[in-house]
Image (tube, grey):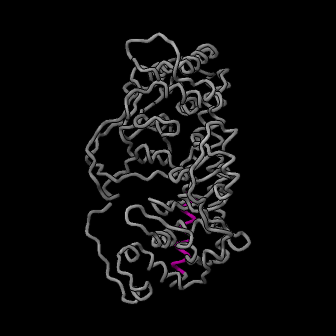
Amino acid sequence: MSRTFQYKAIPSLWLEHNGRRLDCGPYMSGALEAQELLKKHKIELLEKVTDGIYHAGREARQYVDDPECGVPFLKSSDISISDLSHLSYLSRKQVKQNSKFTIKEDWSLITRSGTIGRMAYVRKDMDNFSCSEDVLRVVPDTSIIKSGYLYAYLSSRFGIPLIVSGTYGAIIQHIEPEHVAGLPVPRLGKIEGTIHNFIQNSSDLRAKANIELKEASNKYLESASIGDISQQYWNANSKSTGFRTSIKSDSLRAMNYLPVNHLLENRIKKQAAIWKPLIELVEDDTLRSGPRFKRIDADPEFGVELIGQGECFNLRPEGRWISKKNLPDNLLLFPLDGTIMIAAQGCAGEHDLFGRAKFITGKSLNFAYSQHFLRVIANENEIPRGALFAFLNSHIAYRIRKGYQVGSMQQDFHPDMIKQLPVPIINRKKAEEIDKIVREAYQKYDQAIDLEDEARALVERTIEEGAR
């Protein structure tokens, strides 16, 4: 956020059009400029091109552990993440009683509490999920308007200011359906179909990428004669109290001795033809967190985006711009292609970020990464980097490494235990095939960003050119 004092001269007519409102928010956000520009186009109100704008309403949430009894639940912070395998589950009975919890493919989602205006387009792999009351559902009437075009417009530099201008509240900001129902939606003719196709193709690519990453993990485990574990298996076997075990001098924490973790480690060691500890598969001086450094804010032309755990797992990571001049030249800060980042510090609840893995390639190589990740850089003479990611991204590997956590409130990985995580070694040709699947999946994520950007740019360019 800029600390420079901001000001803007506005026409007195804008005061007339806004009921002589004197707070600066609507005038500084760009909403009024957008309204003036949109007057040059044929306009329909948002409520007239939708089948509903609503949220689920406030009620006590009934969470369940068993996926058979629940529906994946998206919090407002979850609508932008790529990996949906770590979501909590809302009671299927509660979702059935309140149908407004359910979201459908091709809807537009808008966060409405706290951080206003973050958006997502509901993909195939999100269809029939449940979603927080802190998220507005915008249900397009597809007989009137293309769903992809509506999302592209709402998430453009014309739509977002108009949405944000309707916020209210002193400490925690909110918007309600009635605040966006009257938003002007420009009708741009045949080009709306082109814009819709860009958004739809972007959505489909992301859904395919998620499927391919899951397939890559399954193929790796199958090649090692190991099956992945399910959430039900973990729930049934993760007893954390009332067990006996022998302890070692490096830890006195019960979490590090859970019987299920030793069972999973032994499954790998016994069923895999060959296995090696993780430390033997990585480049020297890696398998540790990144460097600490001074963070000096900078404009984008002089800086680099610093990505932390909270941003890393989003479909479109957006970090803090800091001065590149003052950063150390370190491969742990600016990772190599194929580096695996594992969230390694923070709370380790069942649905927190701790322990999740991200493959760094393509667009994600343009960022710097905070020290809060465990850097795993495979020695490609030992194992292709994408193949190692496929294993570490499996549920069994995720559960094993979470058993290495140490700390009180803020968790971290035990530095000696994480080195000994058993990795099954598979046929080199098969590993290279899996590496290719992982890399192609992440290329799809990048292509999806490009298509989404192209759709928004086309919306904005058409609105501007039509207003001249």
The secondary structure that dominates the magenta segment is: helix
- Rendered residue at 60%/45% (across/down): 62
Question: Is 34 placed above or below 234 here?
Answer: below
The part of the chain drawn in magenta is: 450-465
- Rendered residue at 50%/85% (across/down): 468
Residue 318, percent from left and from top: 43, 53
In this rendering, position of residue 448 left or right of residue 278: right
- The quadrant holding residue 55 is bottom right
Question: Can residue 257 be seen?
Answer: yes
Residue 302, percent from left and from top: 30, 56
Which is more toward the observer, 232 or 63?
A: 63
Residue 26, percent from left and from top: 41, 75
In this rendering, position of residue 245 left or right of residue 431: left
Question: Is 346 placed above or below 94 here?
Answer: above
Question: Is 239 placed above or below 45 here?
Answer: above
Question: Can residue 440 be seen?
Answer: no
Which residue is farthest front?
A: 60
Which residue is farthest top?
A: 246
Residue 39, percent from left and from top: 53, 85
- The quadrant holding residue 11 is bottom left
Q: Quadrant of the N terminus?
A: bottom left
